[in-house]
Image: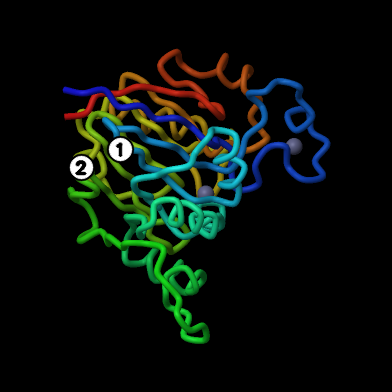
Amino acid sequence: MKQGVLQFLGTGGSMGIPVIGCSCAVCHSEMPHNKRLRPSALVTLGDQRLLIEAGPDLREQALRYGLRTIDGVILTHAHNDHVAGLDELRLFYLYKGAPIPLLLSNDTYDDVAKRFGYIFGQDKRVEGLVACFDIHQLPAERGKVDFVGMTIGYTSYEQAGMRVDGFRFGDMAYISDIRRYPETIFEDLAGVTTLVLTALRYTPSHLHFTVDEAVAFAEKVGARHTWLTHIAHDLDHEKTNAYLPPHVRLAYDGLEITFDYH
Ligand SMILES: [Zn+2]
Ligand SMILES: [Zn+2]
């Protein structure tokens, strides 16, 4: 049994907090925990560092948290708040001197390879392009996959017609952008003790769990600790934590949590 670390690089929803032009109390809050970059996390297992998501704030996150090398990147799905910073990974490719291992579903690959053809070596209009990524496509809808020397579990669900993947590293799972899911997800998450889960706000959303839906899902998984992320400006950090049961907390940018992996 070894210990892994997950650091939240961003815990905001697709708009981040503060939201551009918004005059609400959370967007104007002085509390550092009420400032949230777009969702992303850095998972450290032994001496391997994996980046989850490459969203529009990746440049700022890399500067803020001193990121220079990365052993692999994992994408949950192709929505902009999760992939718009893929271009920033060119630098990591240059520092590494080799393509960066990238783990994603076939659906996500098709989408990002089209949008970022020039860094996937696929833009036929440009000569001599190199692929910045070493692509590892998930072989099925759920299961386990070997990636940069580690066994990673994955499970998939659907958001607005798009496939989304959740990932499991030992006893910790990172489940983003979830609202509708197959019941088999509870088999895939059996034994998870640390759960990272998205919850947008209190009011219903077609695309995301509300706070209450996230708490109910976490209850069903039976995790000892659940950290909520992908948070909209409707949720004040301290007030929401006061509302939540003690084993469910809002994450915040920069927070580091530990977990066991085998
Ligand atoms: Zn606001
Ligand atoms: Zn999202």
The type of residue carrying mark 2 is: Met
166 vs 57, left or right, is: left
Residue 79 position, x and y percent, is 51, 58
Residue 120 position, x and y percent, is 42, 70
Q: Residue at x 51, y 71 (%)?
A: 115
Question: Mark 2 packing: few (<14 Cα in 10 Å), some, or many (20+)?
Answer: few
Q: How was the colour assigned to the protein in this rendering?
A: rainbow
Q: Residue at x 24, y 57 (%)?
A: 141
Above or below, 194 against 103 in this view is above
61 vs 169, left or right, is: right
The type of residue carrying mark 1 is: Gln
Q: Nearer the viewer, residue 77 or 45?
A: 45
Which residue has dot 1 on it? 48
Q: Nearer the viewer, residue 66 or 194?
A: 66
Quick check: marks 1 and 2 in contact, CB under 8 Å? yes
> Please, what secondary structure does the residue beneath circle 1 have?
strand
Residue 59 position, x and y percent, is 59, 47
Q: Quadrant of the C terminus?
A: top left
Q: Nearer the viewer, residue 199 or 8?
A: 8
Above or below, 209 against 228 in this view is below
Q: Residue at x 35, y 27 (%)?
A: 5
Q: Quadrant of the N terminus?
A: top left
> Please, what secondary structure does the residue beneath circle 2 have?
strand
Disc sitting over residue 189 in the figure: none
Above or below, 163 against 194 in this view is below
Which residue has dot 2 on it? 150
Distance, label 1 to label 2, CA atoms, is 9 Å
Q: Residue at x 36, y 20 (%)?
A: 225
Residue 229 position, x and y percent, is 50, 34
Above or below, 234 against 166 in this view is above
